Image: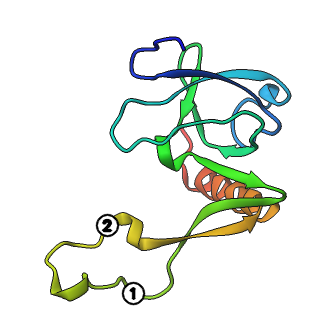
Amino acid sequence: MVYLGSYTRRVTLRVSEVLKGDIRWAGQDITIWAGSRLMHAADQYEEKTEMLLFLAREQTFFYTLNYQHGQFLIEGDSVKNWRVVKEGPPTAPPDGAQNPPSPEDDFNTVSRPYQDVRREIIGLLRLNYIRTPKK
């Protein structure tokens, strides 16, 4: 293992598809710094595992965007633990507790077909592009 400052692992991944960013990375190997030393971060990778990743680029490497919220396991054609917004009003704290609900209480995790998740991501990217003011 190579000590990498705030990270504990250097991982090499093969990119199969790019939904946003430089499409020239498709089919290429990239280096990711993982194993963040931040509390509650869960940016771990295993060999021969297919994942949907949200990555940010530094000068010579990538890292998982938002650590634990930037990677989703793909099994077969399904994305595991995809986050979907809960329907209905927010729930009150249990037993009259004074603690407000955490942001995690606003969504459920589900398995969803990769193609559906892909369409959702591309739709959100297009919507954001339309809303972004032109300079």
Q: Position of residue 66 (x, y in %)?
A: 46, 42
Q: Position of residue 15 (x, y in %)?
A: 78, 32
Res. 56 image quadrant:
top right
Look at 59% across and 35% down and name the residue there. Answer: 55
Q: Amino acid at mark 1?
A: Pro
| 99 with respect to 51 (left or right) | left
Please give the count of numbered marks on the rendered protein: 2
Check disc 2 and report its element: helix, strand or loop: loop
Instruction: Read off the residue under disc 2.
Output: 102
> Is disc 2 surrounded by few (<14), some (14 to 19) or many (20+) residues within 10 Å?
few
Q: Amino acid at mark 2?
A: Ser
Q: Position of residue 134 (x, y in %)?
A: 56, 43
- The quarter of the picture where the N terminus appears is top right
| 24 with respect to 54 (left or right) | right
**Of tags 2 and 1, which is closer to the observer?**
2
On the question of residue 97 being in view, the answer is yes
Check disc 1 and report its element: helix, strand or loop: loop
| 118 with respect to 8 (left or right) | right
Q: Is residue 119 above or below residue 84?
A: above
Q: Is residue 22 above or below residue 52?
A: above
Q: Are marks 2 and 1 in contact (CB under 8 Å)?
A: no
> Is disc 1 surrounded by few (<14), some (14 to 19) or many (20+) residues within 10 Å?
few
Q: CA distance from mark 2 to mark 1?
A: 14 Å
Instruction: Read off the residue under disc 1.
Output: 89
